[in-house]
Each structure stands twice: as C-alpha cells, then as structure tokens.
Amino acid sequence: MNGTASGSQRILITGGAGFVGSHLAELLVEQGHRLLIVDDLSTGSRRNLDHIPGDSYDLIEARVSEVLGACERYRPDRIFHLAAAVGVRLILERPIETIESNVVDTSGILEMASRLGVPTLVTSSSEVYGKSDRVPFREDDDVMYGATSLTRWLYACTKAIDEYLALAHYRQSRLPVVVARLFNTVGPRQIGHYGMVLPRFVAAALAGEPLEVYGDGQQVRCFCDVRDVRRGAGGLDRA
C-alpha cells in the first residue's frame, strides 16, 4: 500500500470535479486521503472543488485516456472511476463523444487497474435495466433496449459494456472491482443544463414557468441524495 500517512491512501478519482465526483472527493479528503483528480471539465467545474483544501489533491484537466501514464505513475491505492458523459441533452447532442468517453476511458482505466491490482469502483447507471417494467429491478433480470437507430439507447448500451469489461477483468485477472448502478442522483451543486430533472423543475418554479413533464406524467422515478451516494461509495473498502 502506498498510503501517504498512517491510515491514509492515495486515491485516483476520474470525473472528480463533477457533481457526484466532487462530493465523493470531499468525503475522501475528510477521511484523510490524498487525491489525484482527473476531469476534462466538460460537465464538471473547478468551482465544485472549492470546498476541498487545495493541498489535499492534484487536478489534471484532461480526458482519462490521455493521461493514463500519469495515473499509473501516481500508484493509487484505490480507484473511483466516475468519468462519463452525463445528461440526456449531452448524450443526444454528442453521441460519438458519449460512446468514446464511456467505453474507451473505462477500458483504459480497467487495464491499468488490472496491471496494478488496485481495488476499483466503476459507476454504471440505472439505464442498464433498459425497458424493463419489472419493479423492483433485479440485477440478474434480462434486459431489452431500443433499436440502434435511436440515440436514446446508446448510453445504456455503453454503460452495459462498461459492466462487461469490469466483470471480464475480474474473471481474467481477479481485479477487485465493484460496479455501482447509480439512479437519479440529486443534491447540491447539480445543474440542469444537460437535462437533469430536479434542477430544471426548481429553475422553472423560481421563474414562475410551467414544469415540463414528458409523456403522460404517470412515470415513476427513483431519486437518491448525493450525500447517500458518496457515503455508499466511500465506505466500500469497509464493506
């Protein structure tokens, strides 16, 4: 172990300047760890890290696949891979970037983690459940996606590939890896620019505008506070 002090670790967080990533980074620093954060700031922001002491982390502004060498030289004790395309609007507007970010970056991180034998968390998505109308969902349910001509389903497919990659690395190299399917995570520092539903509802309500609801309005959605998500992820080493 390459811990920086007694009980502390060197931790790599990809997407660490994003909404969820910055909350996780804040928790890990509170636990006494030292961080290397990699984020291209396409949807994240340096402002999201204002709550964290500047001497507790280093930030590399780049795509994950561009700085894998630096990540490996950092010799992390743990890896949290959160970097991904997020938001319905971004996925529809930039489908190629979405596919490459979700698949290529994840593949590179997992290859590096396998070489180092580093425990790794890969964040997936509830979108992997596809069109299932079975409630509650089960992780071993069969899944069905829409046609490949529909851009809406490419996010679900890429995150499913991420899961296949993670499990393949476990089976072939015994990489200690955990896959976490995040549902609709909400909380402080989330913005509605890329289609996040609650920030858009709040912005519309404050502006006295109608709340835009798609479909017949009978949909059921599950929301999870980001502080619960970060507590679950940050406590995995003690599970």
Image (tube, rainbow, N blue to C red):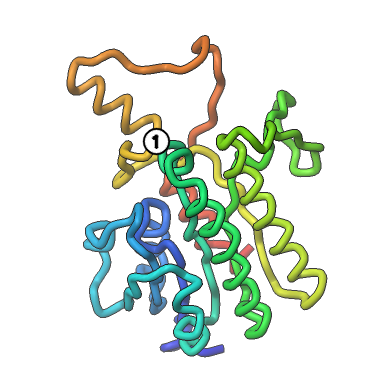
Residue farthest toward the top in the current orientation of the protein: 216
Report which residue position mark 1 lands on: 196
Q: Is residue 98 above or below residue 75?
A: above
**Residue at the (49%, 50%) spot, across then down:** 229
- Residue 175 coordinates in the image, percent (x, y): 71, 74
- Residue 220 coordinates in the image, percent (x, y): 56, 21
Q: For the N terminus, give its image quadrant.
A: bottom right
Total label count? Answer: 1
**Residue at the (72%, 29%) spot, across then down:** 132
Specify the quadrant of the image occupied by residue 35. bottom left
Q: SS at mark 1?
A: loop
Q: Is residue 48 above or below residue 129?
A: below
**Residue at the (67%, 67%) spot, across then down:** 177
Q: For the C terminus, give its image quadrant.
A: bottom right
Foreground of the two, 46 or 194: 194
- Residue 119 coordinates in the image, percent (x, y): 62, 74
Foreground of the two, 100 or 110: 100
- Residue 166 coordinates in the image, percent (x, y): 69, 64
Residue type, numbered disc 1: Met
Specify the quadrant of the image occupied by residue 170. bottom right
**Residue at the (50%, 79%) spot, across then down:** 68
Residue farthest toward the left in the current orientation of the protein: 207
Could you tell whether 41 is left or right of 105 in the image?
left
Foreground of the two, 177 or 91: 91
Foreground of the two, 74 or 187: 74
Could you tell whether 63 is left or right of 103 in the image?
left
Q: Is residue 236 above or below residue 9?
A: above
